[in-house]
């Protein structure tokens, strides 16, 4: 039966705001769930219950209750029990279920410590993915759509097509996998196949094996009814040898079922008019004097000279190879020879962290640095900076450039992935037609980054032009409604192909 207008959607993710977050996936999972709920769909989010991480979080889970649901999974010969707790997402009807398993999920961090992934990550997320199927089964959720995100939940389409192929309750269930980042595929040694609960024969190059290893993202891409990724440009990039990280041939094979949908932003969280992390608010109609006072507060917080006239660049990022820290390190002297300030907030790769610390101590009157994860400061940097740096090597979508645009903070980005789809470079034409919103460079070269920062500083010195760029960026609507509609279209396609396959007698 083709589902009615109201879809039953189960959204499985390994992180989600406001509770557990390492990057953009957390923002997207919750914002999409909210938008689908607002559109009248029945949405259940299923997340791991990272008990210890949650205890440190600023937002405790409201009213967590035990559902009474218990299950035991055979994890390569070990019987591992789990339970299911329930909570709610404020101001929505979204249901939130938490998979509790203390040994797997009660850890100081989500995926890694000191730059090293947990050794049993395969086991942890195979357990979680299998738990999602158990929950759908035991709680009779009968989803129309199982929406999975990244490698951590990409086993789910494979489970649906194999172990659960003939299970009552899944007759109408189709699967969608969203790729947020091809660089993380969940590749593990072949013996981990025993953790998946799937027959050995699926350890083949057409399903779950890649170069002799188990590849969980590949399982999802090969077996999901539909695949999405988080921007149209990234959808094209991952079908190329350079962007496909080894899976480009498979992605090209599935290209007719692959859609790039640009992320949106959650306006209830990222909005300079109401942001609960700011002492002063401002609007698109009159950014000043509110924005200037956010700048002053940020300079104070980061112990930089308080100056109105100096251009202040911000950067909030996972510190990893993806984000362009090598370019910044290479061009440090050239960039910092100018009269400007830069504030960094991030955590990640210990090598780049050390490099940033040494830059910050050498240029202490120009550079402010906080190593760590700090949601509040991230908002204050978006609001208080004049410009925002994202010189990414690759960027599936990127949320910070959209937050920046919303906050009147001009993005300085490389022309790649979702940055291409969301920032319009400043030049004569785009200034004339008032579409310019930021500064964009093409090649992954430190000289291009340095030149672009120089171009940004020069434009900052022309207040009327700068104001035009700020206003054009602030006027853009990044709300999730539009993107959520695109997801619904993909869900319908997934359901249709599932029903066609069922009619043809294939799963
Ligand atoms: P990615 O998912 O690749 O890390 P995105 O731009 O999509 O990149 O999303 C990053 C999200 O994580 C943004 O909401 C950003 O503000 C947040 N973030 C990244 N690093 C930090 C940090 N150290 N402290 C607080 N927030 C951070
Ligand atoms: C990934 C990507 C980032 C994207 C985010 C949310 O972590 O690196 O570009 O914005 O997922 O989709």
Image (cartoon, rainbow, N blue to C red):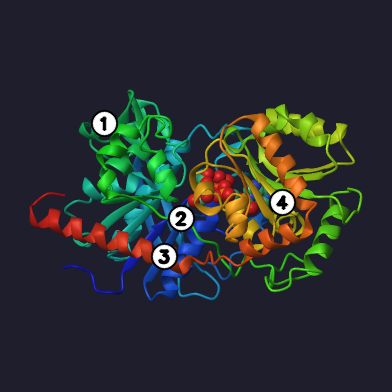
Please say if the residues under marks 1 and 3 sit with CB atoms less than 8 Å apart: no
Q: CA distance from mark 4 to mark 3?
A: 29 Å
Residue neighbourhood size for the residue with mark 3, other residues' Cα within 10 Å, grouped as few (<14), some (14–19), many (≥20)? many
Which residue is label 2 attached to?
262
Residue 500 is situated, as x and y percent measured from the top left of the image, at 13, 57
**Label of residue 92 in the image:** none
Mark 2 against mark 3, which lies toward the viewer? 2
At x 25%, y 57%, the residue is: 494
When asked about the image quadrant of residue 33, the answer is bottom left
When asked about the image quadrant of residue 335, the answer is top right
| 368 is higher (above) or lower (below) than 466 | above
Mark 4 against mark 2, which lies toward the viewer? 4
At x 62%, y 29%, the residue is: 445
Which residue is label 1 attached to?
203
Which residue is label 3 attached to?
484
**Label of residue 387 in the image:** 4
Q: Earlier in the sequence, mark 4 or mark 2?
A: 2
Mark 4 against mark 3, which lies toward the viewer? 4
At x 72%, y 51%, the residue is: 387
Q: Secondary structure at mark 4?
A: strand
When asked about the image quadrant of residue 46, the answer is bottom left
Residue neighbourhood size for the residue with mark 2, other residues' Cα within 10 Å, grouped as few (<14), some (14–19), many (≥20)? many
Q: CA distance from mark 1 to mark 3?
A: 34 Å
Q: Earlier in the sequence, mark 2 or mark 3?
A: 2
Residue 50 is situated, as x and y percent measured from the top left of the image, at 55, 52
């Amino acid at each position: 039966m083709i589902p009615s207008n109201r879809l039953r959607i189960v959204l499985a993710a390994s992180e989600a705001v406001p509770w557990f977050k390492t990057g953009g996936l957390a923002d997207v999972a919750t914002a999409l769930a909210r938008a689908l709920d607002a559109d009248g769909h029945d949405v259940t989010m299923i997340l791991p219950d990272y008990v210890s991480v949650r205890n440190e979080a600023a937002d405790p889970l409201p009213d967590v209750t035990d559902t009474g649901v218990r299950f035991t999974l055979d994890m390569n010969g070990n019987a591992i029990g789990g339970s299911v707790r329930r909570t709610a997402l404020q101001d929505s009807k979204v249901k939130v279920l938490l998979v509790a398993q203390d040994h797997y999920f009660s850890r100081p961090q989500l995926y890694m410590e000191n730059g090293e992934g947990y050794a049993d990550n395969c086991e942890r997320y195979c357990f979680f993915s299998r738990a999602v199927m158990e929950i759908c089964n035991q709680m009779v959720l009968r989803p129309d759509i199982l929406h999975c995100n990244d490698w951590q939940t990409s086993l789910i389409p494979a489970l649906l097509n194999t172990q659960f192929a003939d299970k009552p309750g899944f007759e109408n269930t189709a699967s969608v996998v969203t790729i947020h980042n091809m660089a993380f595929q969940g590749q593990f040694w072949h013996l981990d196949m025993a953790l998946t609960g799937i027959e050995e024969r699926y350890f083949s190059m057409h399903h779950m094996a890649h170069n002799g290893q188990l590849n969980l993202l590949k399982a999802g891409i090969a077996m999901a009814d539909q695949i999405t990724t988080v921007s149209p440009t990234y959808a094209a990039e991952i079908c190329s040898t350079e962007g496909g990280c080894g899976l480009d041939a498979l992605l090209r094979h599935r290209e007719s079922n692959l859609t790039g949908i640009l992320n949106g932003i959650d306006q209830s969280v990222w909005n300079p008019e109401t942001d609960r992390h700011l002492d002063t608010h401002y609007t698109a109609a009159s950014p000043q004097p509110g924005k200037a006072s956010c700048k002053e507060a940020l300079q104070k917080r980061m112990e930089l000279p308080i100056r109105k006239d100096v251009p202040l660049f911000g950067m909030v990022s996972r510190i990893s190879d993806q984000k362009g820290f090598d370019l910044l390190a290479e061009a440090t002297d050239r960039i910092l020879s100018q009269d400007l300030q830069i504030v960094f907030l991030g955590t990640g790769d210990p090598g780049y962290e050390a490099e940033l610390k040494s830059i910050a101590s050498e240029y202490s009157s120009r550079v402010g640095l906080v190593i760590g994860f700090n949601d509040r400061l991230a908002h204050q940097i978006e609001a208080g900076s004049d410009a925002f740096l994202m010189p990414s090597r690759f960027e599936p979508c990127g949320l910070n450039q959209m937050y920046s645009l919303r906050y009147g903070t001009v993005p300085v980005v490389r022309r790649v992935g979702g940055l291409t789809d969301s920032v319009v470079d400043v030049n004569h034409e785009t200034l004339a037609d008032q579409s310019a919103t930021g500064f964009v460079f093409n090649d992954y070269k430190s000289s291009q980054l340095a030149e672009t920062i120089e171009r940004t500083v020069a434009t900052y010195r022309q207040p009327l032009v700068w104001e035009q760029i700020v206003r054009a960026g602030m006027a853009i609507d990044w709300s999730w409604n539009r993107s959520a509609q695109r997801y619904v279209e993909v869900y319908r396609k997934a359901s249709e192909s599932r029903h066609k396959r069922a009619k043809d007698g294939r799963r």
